[in-house]
Each structure stands twice: as structure tokens, then as C-alpha cells.
Image: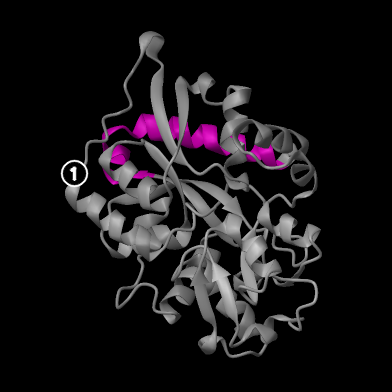
């Protein structure tokens, strides 16, 4: 998730990647038998479980695609990696992709990635506090020190919206950047007043007695589309057949994952180090095949309100399919 929620640090590298690496999306090397080798830049988190499950089920093989998943060093590596041709496709959150678009980074979403469940109390991301915290509701987060994995990105802008909707003033929140795996301990030892955490770390916090006080994805927009799979615009133009086959494979994988949560939990053990007990209890996101475009527009509007895009305005027609 940290990768997938990359922010301004990502941008620096995105811009550098776009300017310095050139575009050479020629990595889809046909192999014997007409199979296309495809590398996908992912983060080893719950969100990308469908593509691993789809690989197991042969959803890509039947489309003459042999997948290789590579863990990027974060969104900071995945977006430039796609632009440079290191990866044919990548996975990133929508805010990071919109930031990239406002920087004229030539990438575009080709398939949905992951979505909020849309249910407060049953989502895969929340703002959590320790069990004895005086914070009991979103409005109480005003003026507090809150950990997010990346500043000026989807985490802090959606947390601000939770506070706004609860009647609080988000302007005084002190967001601090922190790796997601460090957040449960930071909450427990009082290093921060609260942390925006996603699964499996949300389950780690609550297992220690912590409490969720705001469901920021739910508060931001109904059934928020959080992330997507994307490609460079060069690959989209040069090899539309490969993009079509990959998109079809992702969509079949998303639909299968959404309908088979037990198999999702099983596949998590194959590419993550999440404790099996946590895997059994964590809240899974939703994996619809359709991008909820109004929710992405809302995310763009929130980001603009928070100054995430500087003076630019994201053009969703250039980033969404």
C-alpha cells in the first residue's frame, strides 16, 4: 500500500523518470508459441491479490500472456518504471496517477485496481487510535498528529474530508509521514495521536485493542475507486492488442477475486508475509471491474482543495479509460 499511495516523493521520481528515462515500451517480448512476456509493477499488499489469483487460475495464460510480477520500490519506482518500459503495466492509486497526469507523465489507466467497500466499520482503510485515546470520532482528529504513509496524497486528503464531514476543522492537522508497518507501534506508544492505516495493519491495530474512529475512503466518496492498473500511452498506442488482452485478464481476475474471498486469503500467503491469523480476519476490499469515475472526480476535487496538484487541474479524460 505504501507504494500504491505514493505522493510528492513519487512525483519527483515520476518527473525524473519521464524526462530522463525516455520511453521504450518494447519489453513485451513474444516468446515461443506466441506467448507475450509481461512484467507488472506491483506492491506486495492485499490490494493486488486478484492479479496473483488470476495468474494461478490461468486467466492470463489463456490470453497468451505470461505474467511476471515485480515489487517496485513504491509508486516512486512503479510509475517511472512503466514509462521507461521496465514494466509493461503497473499498479498505483488514483491520486498518484492524477499527480502524474498534471506533470504530463505519459501514463493511462487500463483497468480498475481496487475499491473501498463503501461501508463504514467494514472497510479496508481507516484512521485508528489506541484503546485509551480520548479521540472517539472524526471531528476529534482536528489539530492532532496523524501518521500517513505519504504526505500530500490520497491518505491525508481523504482524512481531511472525514474531519470536514464530521464538523471539524482539518486545517490544523499535523500529518507525519511514516511507513505503514511502523504505524501500529507508533499508535500504541503514543508517537502519534492516530494513524491512517490499511489492511493488514488496520487489523494489527485493532487486535491490540485500538479503535477505528474515521473511515476516510467511505467518507470521501461512495464506493471510492482507490487504485488502478496503468500503462504508458506509448504502449497503448503501439500494442493495443496486448493492452486489450491484459485488461481482459485483469477484469476476469477482479471478478473472480470478488466472488471467492477464501481463495483471495489463500493467495495472500503466497506473496506476502502477513501472519496467517491476520489473513483470516482482515477486511478485504472490493474489486469491481468498473472504475467509479464520479468517485475519482471527487478525489480530484478534494486533492485540488488541499493543494496537492499545485496550480494544475487533473484532466481525467487523459488518465482514465
Q: For mark 1, give the secondary structure.
A: loop
Q: Mark 1 points at which residue?
A: 22
Instruction: Tell me: 289 left or right of 277.
Output: left
Main SS, magenta region, reads: helix
Question: What is the quadrant of residue 212 in the picture?
Answer: bottom right
Residue drawn where x is 23% and y is 51% of the image: 18
Q: Position of residue 191 (x, y in %)?
A: 61, 73
Residue 89 part of the magenta-drawn span: no
Residue drawn where x is 57% and y is 42% of the image: 48
Instruction: Give the magenta range.
Output: 231-258
Q: Position of residue 99 (x, y in %)?
A: 36, 64
Q: Is residue 10 above or below residue 243?
A: below
Q: Where is residue 229 in the image (x, y as percent from the top left)?
A: 46, 45
Instruction: Tell me: 222 left or right of 110.
Output: right
Residue drawn where x is 28% and y is 51% of the image: 106
Residue 233 part of the magenta-drawn span: yes
Residue drawn where x is 52% and y is 64% of the image: 178
Q: How is the image coloured?
A: one colour
The mark total stands at 1
**Is residue 88 shown to the viewer in this render?**
yes
Question: What is the quadrant of residue 135 in the picture?
Answer: bottom right
Amino acid at each position: 500500500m505504501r507504494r500504491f499511495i505514493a505522493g510528492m516523493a513519487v512525483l519527483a521520481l515520476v518527473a525524473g523518470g519521464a524526462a530522463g528515462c525516455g520511453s521504450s515500451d518494447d519489453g513485451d517480448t513474444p516468446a515461443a508459441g506466441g506467448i507475450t512476456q509481461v512484467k507488472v509493477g506491483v506492491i506486495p499488499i492485499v490490494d493486488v491479490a486478484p492479479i496473483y489469483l488470476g495468474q494461478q487460475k490461468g486467466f492470463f495464460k489463456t490470453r497468451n500472456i505470461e505474467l511476471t510480477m515485480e515489487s517496485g520500490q513504491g509508486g516512486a519506482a512503479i510509475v517511472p518504471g512503466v514509462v521507461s518500459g521496465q514494466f509493461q503495466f503497473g499498479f498505483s492509486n488514483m491520486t498518484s496517477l492524477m499527480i502524474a497526469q498534471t506533470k504530463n507523465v505519459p501514463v493511462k489507466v487500463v483497468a480498475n485496481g481496487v475499491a473501498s467497500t463503501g461501508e463504514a466499520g467494514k472497510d479496508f482503510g481507516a484512521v485508528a487510535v489506541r484503546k485509551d485515546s480520548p479521540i472517539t470520532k472524526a471531528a476529534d482528529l482536528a489539530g492532532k498528529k496523524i501518521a500517513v504513509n505519504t504526505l500530500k496524497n490520497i491518505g491525508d486528503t481523504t482524512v481531511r474530508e472525514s474531519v470536514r464531514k464530521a464538523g471539524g476543522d482539518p486545517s490544523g492537522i499535523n500529518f507525519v509521514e511514516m511507513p505503514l508497518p511502523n504505524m501500529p507501534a507508533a499508535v500504541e506508544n503514543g508517537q502519534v495521536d492516530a494513524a491512517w492505516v490499511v489492511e493488514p495493519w488496520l487489523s494489527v491495530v485493532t487486535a491490540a485493542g485500538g479503535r477505528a474512529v474515521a473511515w476516510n475512503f467511505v467518507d470521501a466518496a461512495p464506493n471510492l475507486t482507490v487504485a488502478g492498473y496503468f500503462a504508458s500511452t506509448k504502449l497503448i498506442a503501439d500494442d493495443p492488442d496486448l493492452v486489450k488482452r491484459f485488461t481482459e485478464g485483469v477484469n476476469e481476475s477482479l471478478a473472480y477475486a470478488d466472488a471467492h474471498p477464501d481463495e483471495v486469503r489463500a493467495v495472500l500467503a503466497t506473496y506476502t508475509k502477513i501472519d496467517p491469523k491476520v489473513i483470516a480476519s482482515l477486511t478485504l476490499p472490493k474489486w469491481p471491474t468498473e472504475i467509479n469515475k464520479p468517485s475519482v472526480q471527487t478525489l480530484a476535487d478534494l486533492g485540488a482543495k488541499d493543494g496537492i496538484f499545485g496550480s494544475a487541474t487533473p484532466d481525467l479524460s487523459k488518465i482514465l479509460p
